[in-house]
Image (cartoon, helix red, strand yellow):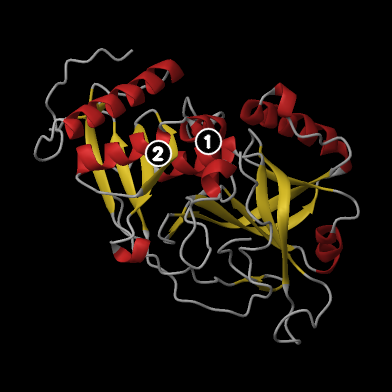
Amino acid sequence: MSQLAPLRARGRLTSLGLVRWVTSSATARAQHGHSHGGVECGHSHGGPMPPDERGTVPPAAEEQTVLAPPEPPAEDSGLPLVQRAKNLLACNWRAQLSTIERALGNSKQPRRPAIYGSLAPFAFLSDGQAVVFLAAGDAHVGNLEGNGLASLTVGATDPAVVATRLRSADGRTVMPRVSLLGELAPVTAGEVEYARRRATRAHVQALGAGAAVELAELLPYRLSVQDARWVDPRGGLHPVDLAEVSSSYVDPFAHEGNALLARLNGARDAPDAHRALCLAYLGAAVEEAHLVSVDRSGFTLLGRSASEHSGEWREFRFAFSSEIRERHALESTLEEMAAEARAHLAAGDEGTIA
């Protein structure tokens, strides 16, 4: 569990504050697929090991930090929040699950229970249910017998090629993510196979048929969500209505989002291309940048420079002037933007691309 609200006692949820990241955002407005400040460009646009499962989780929930207040969304911050949450839930096949350990004495304060966290297969079903799958002997199963309160963080671990890099100075993830809090209980016997079939379908969409997670021997548990939040890269919490999320539009790139991000970030020239985009279009000199989201309205990079804000990550949004719905059109647009950025920088032109 990373930056999850600790679970105190049955029926009560309290928030664990997030680290105070000092970040800022910048947005580039795109014309025909990328940024030219409203001037038409004339173009024709048609792994590493996953993060430690418990390394981002305090061994106990006693530590309280100051909650980072969310910044108001920028004018061109991308899709509506519910759609961003929907896309993130749709493309992830696992989540960080946290439950309350039954045995006392495992925390720094022996009279208070500790939090047990691990990764678990996850699916956000088409009917809006958040489901995780556990083996019969999993420690979470025993914990739930004593207290059903649980929390899920979706989006903090994948794609691993990105998540392993996007960490704050103290090791916490800065990946955008969704935090869900509520009661976790076994799916009723009559719905077990239904949940497995729906989850398998979601995993096939996210991972491909050959990489779908085997769920036959695992038991589905449904989270009755009491609170849902979008957690932005600086740690700001933005409430989202899960009913609105489940009924919202699914972006054309939602289901394959993580696979697409892994491929784009894993390209040989990706590090240079991402730095060039930030510098040429936004005038931001970053030493490292990674693509963290793509959608029909644009894409977002997280970048950092060691000389600015102690090397903290900043969010850079590139907004398309018109929607892009096909993967080949998206990829060709990104390639053209990177080529244009490199050419601009090589020519030594002053200022940013207009």
Whether residue 79 is visible: no
Q: Describe residue 224's horizontal placement relative to residue 344 as left or right.
A: right
Relative vertical location of residue 324 with respect to residue 114 in this rendering, above or below? above
Identify the residue position indicated by label 1 in the image.
247
Residue 76 occupies quadrant: top left
* Circles 2, 1 touching at the beta carbon (< 8 Å): no
Kind of residue at disc 1: Ser
- Residue lying at 46% horizontally and 69% vertically, measured from the top left: 19
Identify the residue position indicated by label 2 in the image.
271
Q: What is the secondary structure assignment of the residue under circle 2?
A: helix
Report the front residue among 161 and 89. Answer: 161
Kind of residue at disc 2: Pro
Report the front residue among 9 and 306. Answer: 306
Q: Describe residue 138's horizontal placement relative to residue 287 as left or right.
A: right
Q: Describe residue 49's horizontal placement relative to residue 68 as left or right.
A: right
Residue 276 occupies quadrant: top left
Residue 130 is situated, as x and y percent measured from the top left of the image, at: 66, 45
Q: Nearer the viewer, mark 2 or mark 1?
A: 2
Q: In which quadrant will I find the C terminus?
A: top left
Residue 195 occupies quadrant: top right
Relative vertical location of residue 134 with respect to residue 291 in this rendering, above or below? below
Query: Is tag 2's residue or tag 1's residue first in the polypeptide sequence?
Result: 1
Residue 90 is situated, as x and y percent measured from the top left of the image, at: 58, 36
Q: What is the secondary structure assignment of the residue under circle 1?
A: helix
Residue 14 is situated, as x and y percent measured from the top left of the image, at: 58, 72
Residue 318 is situated, as x and y percent measured from the top left of the image, at: 29, 37
Whether residue 303 is visible: yes
Report the front residue among 326 and 343. Answer: 343
Few, some or many C-alpha atoms within 10 Å of disc 2 (few <14, some 14-19, many ≥20)? some
- Residue lying at 62% horizontally and 70% vertically, measured from the top left: 6
Few, some or many C-alpha atoms within 10 Å of disc 1 (few <14, some 14-19, many ≥20)? some
Relative vertical location of residue 40 with respect to residue 117 in this rendering, above or below? above
